[in-house]
Amino acid sequence: MRTAGRRGGPRGFTLVEVLAALGIAALAVMGVLAVFASAVRSYRRARDGMEAANIANSLAAEARAVFTIDRTLEPVTGGHWPGKHRYTYDVTYVPLDKEGDEVLMHVRVHWKEGGEPVPLDFDTILLRKME
């Protein structure tokens, strides 16, 4: 800031000072927007992970109900959850004992993030009820 004379005349900012202040303010706003964008990406990633976990949990509950009744489990490839068409899933089963009373269920849920598929894997063990 400079004075307009020796006798305390009107004071003001030069054009360079105003442009420098605007540049600093623009940098600060860009930093805040970058943090906001990162927070939105983190929220979406967490939301997608929770949806995938809910889908896997529901699939495990359905498989557990079927397995305790008749032990027939069918693998699934490219399944779609009703109302959640953005997500696809694959389910495989691996017997853990000779009698077939224990089965490892592997669920992989996929969705697209930025054009790239994102897989998330879940495993659980199914046990047939013993009489």
Image: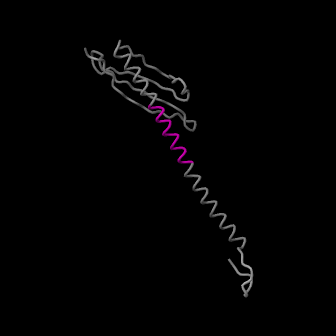
What residue lies at 72% left-to-right and 71% top-to-bottom? Answer: 15
Residue 30 on image: x %, y %: 61, 56
What residue lies at 43% left-to-right and 28% top-to-bottom? Answer: 56
Query: Is residue 47 rendered magenta in the image?
Result: yes
Q: Nearer the viewer, residue 88 or 61?
A: 61
Which quarter of the figure has residue 32? bottom right
Residue 115 on image: x %, y %: 58, 36
Q: Left or right: where does residue 96 sit relative to residue 48?
A: left
Residue 88 on image: x %, y %: 51, 26
Q: Left or right: where does residue 65 sit relative to residue 23?
A: left
Quarter of the image with the N terminus in it: bottom right
Residue 83 on image: x %, y %: 55, 25
Q: Main secondary structure of the magenta part?
A: helix
What residue lies at 55% left-to-right and 26% top-to-bottom? Answer: 85
First to last magenta residue range: 37-53
Q: Nearer the viewer, residue 38 or 65?
A: 65
Which quarter of the figure has residue 124? top left
Query: Is residue 122 rendered magenta in the image?
Result: no
